[in-house]
Image: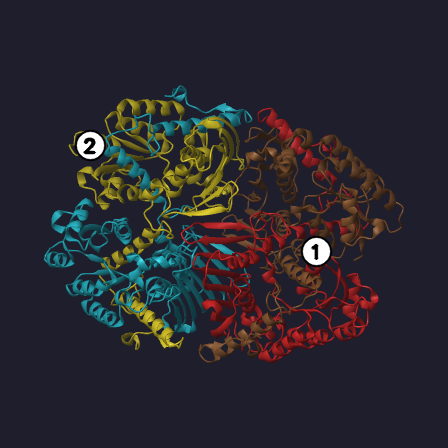
Chain colours: A yellow, B cyan, C brown, D red
Amino acid sequence: MAKFCWGLIGGGRGSQIGPAHRLGATVDGNFKFVAGALDANADEGRKFALELGLEGNRAYEDWKEMLTHEINRTDKLDLVTVATPNSTHFEISKAFLEAGFNVLCEKPMTTNIEEGEALLAIAKKSNRICAVNYGYSGFSLVREMKSMISDGVIGKIRLIKTEFAHGHHADEADANNPRVRWRYDPAQAGVSAVMADCGIHALHMACFVSGEEVLEISADFVSTIPSRELEDDAMVNFRMTGGVVGRLWSSAIALGRQHGLTIQVFGEKGGLRWAQEQPNQLYFTALGGRTQIIERGDSSLSLMAQASSRVTIGHSEGMPLAFANIYVDIAKALSSNKANTSKAVKPLYPNAEDGLRSIAAVHAAYASSEEMGKWMPAVPLSLKTGG
Amino acid sequence: MAKFCWGLIGGGRGSQIGPAHRLGATVDGNFKFVAGALDANADEGRKFALELGLEGNRAYEDWKEMLTHEINRTDKLDLVTVATPNSTHFEISKAFLEAGFNVLCEKPMTTNIEEGEALLAIAKKSNRICAVNYGYSGFSLVREMKSMISDGVIGKIRLIKTEFAHGHHADEADANNPRVRWRYDPAQAGVSAVMADCGIHALHMACFVSGEEVLEISADFVSTIPSRELEDDAMVNFRMTGGVVGRLWSSAIALGRQHGLTIQVFGEKGGLRWAQEQPNQLYFTALGGRTQIIERGDSSLSLMAQASSRVTIGHSEGMPLAFANIYVDIAKALSSNKANTSKAVKPLYPNAEDGLRSIAAVHAAYASSEEMGKWMPAVPLSLKTGG
Amino acid sequence: MAKFCWGLIGGGRGSQIGPAHRLGATVDGNFKFVAGALDANADEGRKFALELGLEGNRAYEDWKEMLTHEINRTDKLDLVTVATPNSTHFEISKAFLEAGFNVLCEKPMTTNIEEGEALLAIAKKSNRICAVNYGYSGFSLVREMKSMISDGVIGKIRLIKTEFAHGHHADEADANNPRVRWRYDPAQAGVSAVMADCGIHALHMACFVSGEEVLEISADFVSTIPSRELEDDAMVNFRMTGGVVGRLWSSAIALGRQHGLTIQVFGEKGGLRWAQEQPNQLYFTALGGRTQIIERGDSSLSLMAQASSRVTIGHSEGMPLAFANIYVDIAKALSSNKANTSKAVKPLYPNAEDGLRSIAAVHAAYASSEEMGKWMPAVPLSLKTGG
Amino acid sequence: MAKFCWGLIGGGRGSQIGPAHRLGATVDGNFKFVAGALDANADEGRKFALELGLEGNRAYEDWKEMLTHEINRTDKLDLVTVATPNSTHFEISKAFLEAGFNVLCEKPMTTNIEEGEALLAIAKKSNRICAVNYGYSGFSLVREMKSMISDGVIGKIRLIKTEFAHGHHADEADANNPRVRWRYDPAQAGVSAVMADCGIHALHMACFVSGEEVLEISADFVSTIPSRELEDDAMVNFRMTGGVVGRLWSSAIALGRQHGLTIQVFGEKGGLRWAQEQPNQLYFTALGGRTQIIERGDSSLSLMAQASSRVTIGHSEGMPLAFANIYVDIAKALSSNKANTSKAVKPLYPNAEDGLRSIAAVHAAYASSEEMGKWMPAVPLSLKTGG
């Protein structure tokens, strides 16, 4: 597959979403990270971009400079990801689309309907990709759900029940916390807080897996913390094309819940259940049958689900990130110019001693078993006297 | 932090471990993937290396060519990862260490004790890093366990109970499956099958979290499938420094278990419990107290655990890989030179229509709530007649 | 504590609720089952009552006969349980209350508000107990929730989220199944199906644990199976005294869910979570703290919770019913007048051979451990040659 | 089915096992509790027996009086349950068997092999039932396992992995706690502590579900708390008839585990997994298939499993005990001679006000739904002004 050039706007140092985009874009070798305007602080953005390995002339001060320069390059960007504050999504995405770039915009695409309509029109006219990052739709078993539903496995859908309810804004004292406060301020966040921030993912997922669209909505928004103008808890009933009934609960005050994105789809012939916090299992119950646990990575899955799984069955999807931590340990040792010679402080990465000890233990286990369980020494000779 | 040059041996197309190493090495910007000898088939290895973006003169035919060339470069490799078949680990790691390279070797470091002793001696003499990839020790909450134990939270350890038991070799018909058969053939696999392949991880984890080493072992190896020479199920009792008692079960015939790496540590003042398949929760019970659920990403965790977490609390660790699937979708659209113009086939990535529909739905929900739950239309105007 | 005389109306052979009432009433020795009118079929009811050990003159043909006779006895009933079809609850409860009896009525107490008002007035006037069996409020950890909330552990309640959603009426073909059909027929079931049958329990539980009452309601009832007149899925938003917001989902078409009664209570200082299907764990998260698992039977529980637990910590609450199955096995053997002499068919209850084998195994294990794991024979001498 | 007369020895006030036997014996109407020698303290035993409703001449001072008197009755006991301290099991069971009574003895049947052999011989000679209460074998899904295995569903068994590991003896300070101390004293407990107390259940279950017997054993007993003479942690490997390999872990120091009785059975064609703490689900994985969740009470279960289930699918098995708590509440009210008239203190059982409020709420929900979600008052008229 060809390589594409990729640029990122926003996602600077300390950003939560930035690393996920950099990893997501580059991990499969489709995109090469070549340009960035990473921070509202131009100096800081350039500095961070250089640290991440961008060349100096593509470590931009801001998105406008990026646009001006990239438009004239022969190797210009194939895709620009917009991961800036919500209120700037429209302006930046519009500018890049109109200049002929493909865009992946973080959600929400815009903060009001008028800009949304405008951006859609621009995207259509430009004939460029204008994607929106409802990233949870990328989970392998979410795609298996979509595939099963599309194949008619659960028959006509009757009801979708979805939730995105966490408890991270349950502290009334956060009225003085700027990282939380703006979310409940209409001047900064628009008409909705938790529904626009979290519930919107659940709503998109309902559409994504079912292939249906939302037609009508009845909602109950509540500010359970009185000082908040916008809702911190929302119950939304909806109706979709195809006669599907929807129920969606979103909350930011559900103490004890960490994330809480779940979806249940009930059809004439079966039901499906999935939760983001345990994304490797999908529960399927056929009418009259027993509930089956579908594992990510299973060879019986749809091509769509298999293509979106990078880790073998039974492993948590974060396994490569566990590997990454071993590499971080090694990088630290390289940086400090010290290898595994210090006896005082054992490095955090497993070293040759660990490797040898493990092998010796396996051999001791084998030898013990050969002698009916006799206890055998497991310490390698060279390490017996302290190595 | 400085950039280091990284090379990979093995991990060719279709390999399971290769992508995890490439992601793990590069995701944090510490290492740059610059050289590879990826496949026993030289042509195929070079071709795949070029696809992955290596420059032509560092896409090597084999590890020997890699060694010969890299040794003379001024920008030579800072780290070489050896992810080849087990029987070759020793020869390759030895050659690179002796030539002054740092090495990360896949487990098992060697296939017998003699080579293990030799490699440890070489590593010490070389004063280079010789790391072994017990990658599960990289999980954030495994490190939290290590930190808690080191801080004395559970007191003196009495017992460690660990398992690595799966069911993927439970089919007797696999006697004719070359991908399984070799594992139970002493000529190819050495003295042990499931203990050397899986149990060894559990054993290392027991050492890693406790800071203790294994002293003695009593084992019961069984071939539950009679045609196998090596064990497909093993129970290992062990004793560690510090008076710790260990129990380890490893199996390949445990039908219904997918991976099954778990560890429980019981001390004088508390107990800990963790499972690889749900790596984001660690269970801690203080003597006389209630069991607490410790979440990865929680701000109360140790620095060691926090430093090894890249995803915010509540998200599954594979979340960036879900993002990656959105990027794959976009890359496909770019490759086919088609954007979101086709009405017949909706692209798999969320597009501007999805973005607009979501925004309209949030606004409809807000409006409904303002009118006490009145049902409101949620379809944006421009999409009412089919867009 | 004194013994009370107890009578049951309804709950005949094959009834699901009857055995639960008989067990519930008598297990603690407070009530003695002395009178019954168990079946609409008078003969069948009397026959079953005699089988259950009632004396002939208190095995009544119907509730009217029961009322007439009991009223004149000196040892008349202290409590009458009404477990008949819903439409008869009012008439029967009214008659017994007016005659001076205490009544426990199955839910729903009546099928309409007018009769409910009337029965409440009668109960007050009678100065007798008129209890309604919202039996799930009897679970020990539900009472622990009530106690914790009452003690202010989670502060002022903001939100209660409760569900009772199962999938047992998801088959459209049940339109022809008389056991299901009547539930969706307004003529027989009144204005509501799943809300009146299931959701009502969730609603009561919200009131029970919080000590608050429902003030206002906004609901969305849906018949997802078109042939049904009454709803098989309901979403109910409500407001309670104390400013509590409520959300309740009830469904009968949620394929894959077996029972699905859950409750989550979110307050200013903490959150609580409980599910009927795993009633022995209550999850509590204090603001800023970690989630704790509270176990039924734990010595730290409130007196109210401890008083309502009959099984020690860690045992499933159904453990005594597992014991009951051993007694059933023995009763069968007694009935067939055969003891453990038949070698061909091993009785299902563990017998003396099992007892001996177990003891021999424990001793063999001890002896093996004394000899460092040496394999020891475990078969008792007398059973070595087949006993 | 005929009624049998049942007597209990031991199980006095405060006993944990006594109530489970009384419930288990009587709940199905097979046995009538007519005689008891409930306490080592004769007065206390008689007093408690009378409270439980026994007639005065069958509330015995001790088992010897019980034996002497019962043997001469025409309506003598059909079954005697022996729930006394372990060391007395042999003497009592022997005496009753030799006198022609059927006996159900608590486990362990005897405290040494010699007495076990003797009791087995007596049982055979007597031609009476000598049952041993491995009560966990009574769980419905344990019997489903047995049935499935017997039917060949998982093929020839390769391995059984079972555990009974709790953490309730993890406190070293219990060396001074008489309720714990005796268990680790060989003079009182014999050769084994946790294996004889807990592991023995796991071992019996392995035999029960497989239909195989233990042949040989290799064990590792450890006293992790040094002051203990007997083991508080045991790992037992065993071999069974039919070539089955067994692994059993039992512990009393596994902090964080409450009970921990689990069993996994792996065969040529499938695997099964069950845990006592969540007894209503059995996990079954066929070779090459997905894991299925088998629910207690499901209509597809074996007759053996269905016959041993008293509660409908989805309900926790302890549901009747929740009902029992409602009856306790009512009994308290009856005892205090107060009904639901006190406004100050609401009774714990749901009363007519609760019944009415619930009905009014269902009607309000219906009315709201009829008017498209309009908010409706839910408080019944008569309760609006405080009732």
Residue B358 image offset from top left, x and y in percent: 41, 29
Q: Nearer the viewer, residue A58 or C281?
A: C281
Looking at the rendered structure, the kind of residue marked 2 is Glu
- Chain designation of label 1: D
Q: Circle 2: is it few (<14), some (14-19), or many (20+) Cα within 10 Å?
A: some
Is the N terminus of chain C in the top left, top right, bottom left or bottom right quadrant? bottom right
From this viewpoint, is residue D166 visible?
no
**In the image, which is nearer the foreground, mark 1 or mark 2?**
1
On screen, residue C361 above or below D146? below
Pick out the residue farthest to the front: C344
The label shown at residue A70 is 2
Is the C terminus of chain C in the top left, top right, bottom left or bottom right quadrant? bottom right
Residue B225 shown left or right of residue A289 in the figure: left
Q: Quadrant of residue B167?
A: bottom left
On screen, residue A208 above or below A24? above
- Chain designation of label 2: A
On screen, residue A141 above or below D328? above
Which residue is located at x 56 percent, y 58 percent? Answer: D142
- Badge 1 is on which residue? D28
Residue D177 image offset from top left, x and y in percent: 61, 72
Residue B270 image offset from top left, x and y in percent: 49, 64
Q: CA distance from mark 1 to mark 2?
A: 82 Å
